[in-house]
Amino acid sequence: MGAALCLLSAACFGAMAVFGKLAYDAGVSPTALLLVRFGLAAVLLGLVLLTRPGLRGAAPGGGRPATRRGRVVAVALGLGAIGYATQASLYFSALKLMDASLLALILYTYPVLVTVAAVLLGRDRLSPRRGAALVAASGGTLLVLLGAGGAGFHPLGALLAFAAAVTYTVYILVSDTVVHRLAPVALSALVMTGAAGTLGARALVTGGVDLSFGWRGWFWLAAIAVISTVVAMLAFFAGLKRTGPSTAAILSTFEPVVTAALATLTLGEALTPAQLAGGALVLASVAVLQLRPGGARARERASGHPARDGLTEPTPASR
């Protein structure tokens, strides 16, 4: 059941780019997509917390002073208002310019970027296993970009996609400082609220957002908010609880595979053989980064708690 929930979460996240393309075809602008997605997701997660108080977890900071608890909440809101809002804006701007399948492969370089940053910051060490994974991922990314021979490739779109991956990397490194101080659903709700606040303020400053598109646009926006945000997050939480972080992270590599498959079936997109080979290398490197040596697994079984192995596992509140 835990593995099935993780795969369900990856499939829901993987469908987001396709839903976004279909929303664009229905007349939805990137600004409207982002505002509705985060606003609706924040409301739905808030309702979940109201109806399921047990998901709120302990108060942030436990028995620490109110100023410390307030700081944790402020960081969580800032993660959404600055980090997630920026990452999502870059992602959906890139989606406007390039194929969903190629975008997914470029974005999925973020676990490798997180590993490199963690090593440079002294939070982790570069083991032979991680070194091999980094070489494979770099070669895979090069194949993805060099193999782009179709109309789906757009240089600016690729740059925006990579910028989204870099922003996502910074987001994960910062969120690692608060992810253990807030319950996952509460953290997600705060992140969504912060992002919705930033996008709402931007809409006010720039003269508003056009929401006059038809019911098809609203249908795909609801699919993004409900399926690719709320359901995806809650399924990931439930799967993570049953499988542990390493297994959940490995199973999450199913996400870009789903994006590519759905884009081929519904949008008529196709990756070149070189891009497919490069994508396979990137996904393999992500899986290798999440695998643990036998000693770590033994310590995990002995302690009864998952041992952290770097910062490369996806944070549940950061899609």
Image: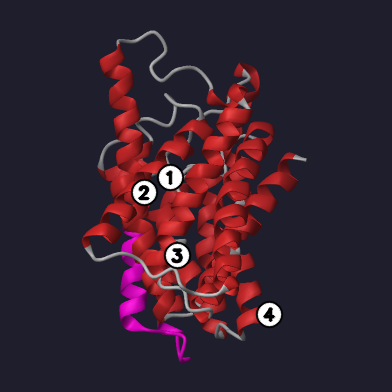
Marks 1 & 3, CB-CB < 8 Å contact: no
User: Residue at point 60% right, 73% down?
Assistant: 216
- Dominant SS in magenta: helix
N-term mark: 3 or 2: 3
Q: Position of residue 127 (x, y in %)?
A: 41, 43
Please state which of the two labelled residues, at mark 3 or mark 4, is closer to the viewer. 3
Please, what is the three-letter code of the amino acid marked with disc 2?
A: Ala
- Checking the image for residue 195, the label placed there is 2
In magenta stretch: residue 150: yes
Quadrant where the N terminus is found in the figure: top right
In magenta stretch: residue 2: no
149, above or below 130, in the image: below
Magenta stretch bounds: 146-166
N-term mark: 4 or 2: 2
User: Residue at point 61% right, 66% down?
Assistant: 219
User: Counting other residues with Cα less than 10 Å from the Cα at mark 4, is it few (<14), some (14-19), or many (20 or more)?
Assistant: few
Please, what is the three-letter code of the amino acid marked with disc 3?
A: Leu
Q: Secondary structure at mark 4?
A: helix
Q: Position of residue 220 (x, y in %)?
A: 58, 67
N-term mark: 1 or 3: 3
User: Which residue position holds label 3?
Assistant: 33
User: Which residue position holds label 4?
Assistant: 265
Q: Secondary structure at mark 3?
A: helix
Cα–Cα gap, marks 3 and 4: 23 Å
